[in-house]
Amino acid sequence: MRLSRHFLPVLKESPSDAQIVSHKLMLRAGLVRQTAAGIYAWLPLGQRVLQKIAQIVREEQDRAGAIELLMPTLQSADLWRESGRYDAYGPEMLRITDRHDREMLYGPTNEEMITAIFRDSARSYRDLPRTLYHIQWKFRDEVRPRFGVMRGREFLMKDAYSFDIDEAGARHSYNRMFVAYLNTFARMGLRAIPMQADTGPIGGDLSHEFIVLAPTGESEVFYHSNWEKPAELSSVDFDDVAGLQSIVSTYTADYAATDEKRDEAAEAAAGDALRQSRGVEVGHIFYFGEKYSKPMNLRVQGPDGAEVIPHMGSYGIGVSRLMGAIIEASHDDNGIIWPDAVAPYKVGIINMRVDDEACTAAADDLYAKLQAAGVETLYDDRDERGGAKFATMDLIGIPWQIVIGPKGLAKGVVELKRRATGEKEELSIEDALAKVSA
Ligand code: ATP
Ligand code: MG
């Protein structure tokens, strides 16, 4: 994409209404604009990153055996009366009345809807186990929307729902998602710690929040210092019940808990290794048994002919919140440092002198070659000072930057810069092309 034809409204000044660095940078880098409290328009650059994050989430859901569908944002109140949550949910639910006076709502989550959809077609134990997911906008009328997309009112969530014949099956489905989450966040360059989390009124002990440590996070968390070491996951067989359980056991061996689930004995055992921090909740997984299947009358025929009530779990990832979390974890004074996997463009070309024929010819040619090679490239062909171009590329965090100027060209070289390290090297255009295309 040529920057001269792009829509990339960057801000020079730090917006005064933004309190945390990710929110400031998202506004400055032209990723989002607020259109109402807690509601954001995703500008072209933000939309590209959002889609990359969603795609990683999707690929890891698919790999873990989950199946994608798409449910609507608007739901009928009657559906929620079946589970008893319509009255229980409170003012966070945006309630709407249509022209026929039918009560509707903008979905804050989809347990009821997926249970109804599954109920309509599942007949026997052969229809189990299944995990279904979608990536869809949610609305929660948060009391205090803040920190930009971190706590919005409208936000993009991946929510998955599992259906199993019994508790043991549900445990395996839970483990699949647990491991899928480890892989998902690792691919985005994030270390999200699975922490014992509150199951609320539902009870049971099977709930984990995936928390990215950040001083500006809203959650107070406690963990063993072992979590500070990077952890690597090798390839996973999602059908291997024991293997998956063993991975989950490894990842839950070291103490990590949110404020509500602090465990005095475990903290005493951790001793000097106990750490306290703040964190951002990027995912939350939940096993809740028959909580929805029972009141909503979901039944299937078991292998012995008797009716069984499927056990369910639900699994959320804050797709739009993740953008904020990634920026909190990866930025410097000059701007965002996108991990390659979610960068809006992989390569930026800076033409230092658009009025210089040789420079423009070389930059145009390099741009054409990168396009042909399928490398996502942002080409700064604007008639602007070099300094302003450097600042923009750094602000928007493009991982590889190729600078083409008259002096270098005379020597037959361009400058290749790595955003993350600031490392620069001079090399021929061919070598630069080969390196960034690799
Ligand atoms: P929180 O405790 O942060 O309010 P929650 O526990 O209500 O979140 P879940 O229902 O578990 O959220 O939703 C799944 C995921 O959706 C969360 O882990 C979080 O990443 C994301 N999420 C929830 N609320 C918001 C919001 N208001 N804005 C952006 N993302 C959100
Ligand atoms: Mg939660």
Image (cartoon, rainbow, N blue to C red):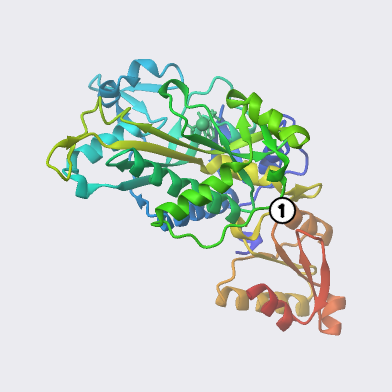
Nearer the observer, 217 or 409: 217
Image quadrant occupied by the C terminus: bottom right
Quarter of the image where one finds residue 110: top left
Label 1: which secondary element: loop
Q: Quadrant of residue 366?
A: bottom right
Whether residue 194 is visible to the viewer of this picture, yes or no, is yes
Percent position (x, y) of residue 223? 67, 36
Query: How many badges with numbers are in the image?
Result: 1
Q: Residue at x 56, y 27 (%)?
A: 37
Residue 159 drawn at (x, y percent): 42, 41
Residue at 81% of width from left, 84% of height from top?
Answer: 412
Rendering coords of residue 262 (x, y %)? 62, 26
Report the front residue among 355 and 195: 195
In the image, is 12 to the left or to the right of 50? right
Name the residue located 54 percent from the left edge and 30 percent from the top edge.
Answer: 197
Say if 77 sits above or below 152 in the image.
Answer: above
Badge 1 amino acid: Ile
Q: Is mark 1 within 8 Å of ligand 1?
A: no
- The residue identified by callout 1 is 337
